[in-house]
Amino acid sequence: MNDPYKVLGVSRNASDDEIKEAYRALAKKYHPDNYGENNPLKDLANEKMQEINAAYDQIQKERASGAGQKDSYGSGSYGNYSYGNYGYGYSTGNGGTYNKEYAEIRHMINDNRFSDAEKRLSAVPEASRVAEWHYLKSIILMRRGYVNESMRELSIACDMDPSNYEYQKAKEMFNSRAGKYGSAYGAGPDGQYRRSGGCSTLDVCTSLICADCLCECCGGDLIRCI
Amino acid sequence: MFGYVKPYQPELLVKEYEFYRAVYCGLCRSMKKNTGVLSNAFLNYDAVFLALARMAFSDEEPEAELRRCIAHPTRKRTMLKSSPAIDYSARAFASLAYYKNLDDIEDKSFFGKLTRYSIHPVIAHAKRLADIGELDVIVSEGLKEISALEGAGCAEADRPAEVFGRLLGEVFKCGVDGNDALLLYECGFHLGKFIYIADALDDYEKDVRENNYNPFRLTYGDGGLSDSVRNDIRVALILECEGIERAVDLFPEKHPIVINIIKNIIYMGLIKRLDTINGKGKTDERSL
């Protein structure tokens, strides 16, 4: 087996806290929630997760028996994560809906019967499509990887029913996921600094002086006074 | 369609920046050697990304050398020596450029056709030398499928984007098997979707002016895109970045510098480019 310290990316004399920290960060990264039901990489991520769990367990064991250090936290690894229902999308909880038709479609989505659910949705005449219709459509599109259309449907749902907690929360969740990206650390509030373009007046002067010197070297003179 | 995939320079370490440039120069040299002189005029940043992704899986340690080149005669430049990753990327992009050009010849106006025809011999020659048989069908069929969707006035940007994603996924994984192929495919798949949608967003105003196909014109009309619509598209694109990230997180850690540059590109480079499209954060568009 690989060196458990290497797997977690910590040195051999790292403190227990550091190891725990490293373990948590990795567990979060490869958590099955990140690799949803239909992500083709979920098996690979699962393997990686098991490797990390094993490494963490082994270090805990070694430290508990070796130096007589007790595992003061009393907590093992996070154990086996079960695949959540949300993964690459969002959960379909019962957001206070009483419409029987939509409740059934929600069931289908929860059972991963997307094409059935989609058929039922398309059967709803266009005029009577309420906010929930757009919300459910958005979930199905997201599961199929049509993120762009999915976001559009979600926005429609939010616009039609601005007071619905479930829709707003889904939207907020995506916005906050998006917020993680593009924020450079330590480079000003907007994450970027301004680079002034072109050359300043001072640059012009120095360039001219340089040019003048060069001319003088060759016997000519560009600017008489210097 | 090309040139979106660039690192965000202020966040690169100096050694990463130099490495990136060395890959770029190495790729240019490889193109000259493998796909013919002049073909390196079609070199772009996306090809560098492909080279980096393939490099992440190779056991070879990247080696650099100092050389002179025609474009920069005054000073010797560091460039990576040719390796399978770099040569593959050079050849794959020659094929892509060829089919893209053929595709453009069909749907451009007279002057557009003229410029495309004038570069055609160089690209056709490059493609002949590149000689990647497996890619021919994938790329030509993929682009044909996209043209068909565009011709039929498909209003859902996701559908042609998905086709382009599949195409790029195949390009990324070509010639690799097992889990590595899966990871490369996912990386290329989400990148392709990102590029297609970002490109449609970028071209929206131009397409409205010139009355060309654009999925966002069909969905949101010609009256311009509101801020909330732009935000929706931005979030959708960032979810694609997330898709790439999931794959890159599982890349082997053979060459940390390569992984760091790739992460810079997906965490920041792509988004900065996107914000430039949306008219926010005018980052400088100078070359790296």
Image (cartoon, grey):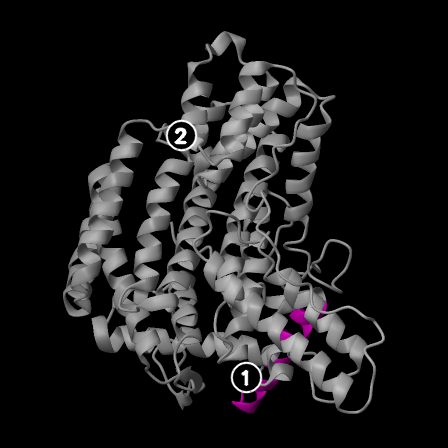
Give, as a three-letter code, the residue at label 1. Answer: Asn
What whole-number distance in Å separates the C-alpha atoms at marks 2 and 1?
Answer: 44 Å
Q: Is residue A76 above or below residue A98?
A: below
The residue that label 2 is drawn on is: A115
Above or below, A157 against A148 in this view is above
Q: Secondary structure at mark 1?
A: loop
> Residue B214: image x %, image y %?
39, 32
Is residue A216 shown in magenta?
yes
Q: What kind of element bears circle 2?
A: helix
Residue pictured at 60% horizontal, 28% vertical:
A155
* The image quarter in which residue A66 lies: bottom right
Give the vertical position of B102 relative to B38 (above or below): above
Which residue position holds label 1?
A2
**Is B150 positioned to the left or the right of A190 in the image?**
left
Residue span colored magenta = A202-219
> Dot 1: within a 10 Å radius of its alpha carbon, few (fewer than 14), some, or many (20 or more) residues?
few
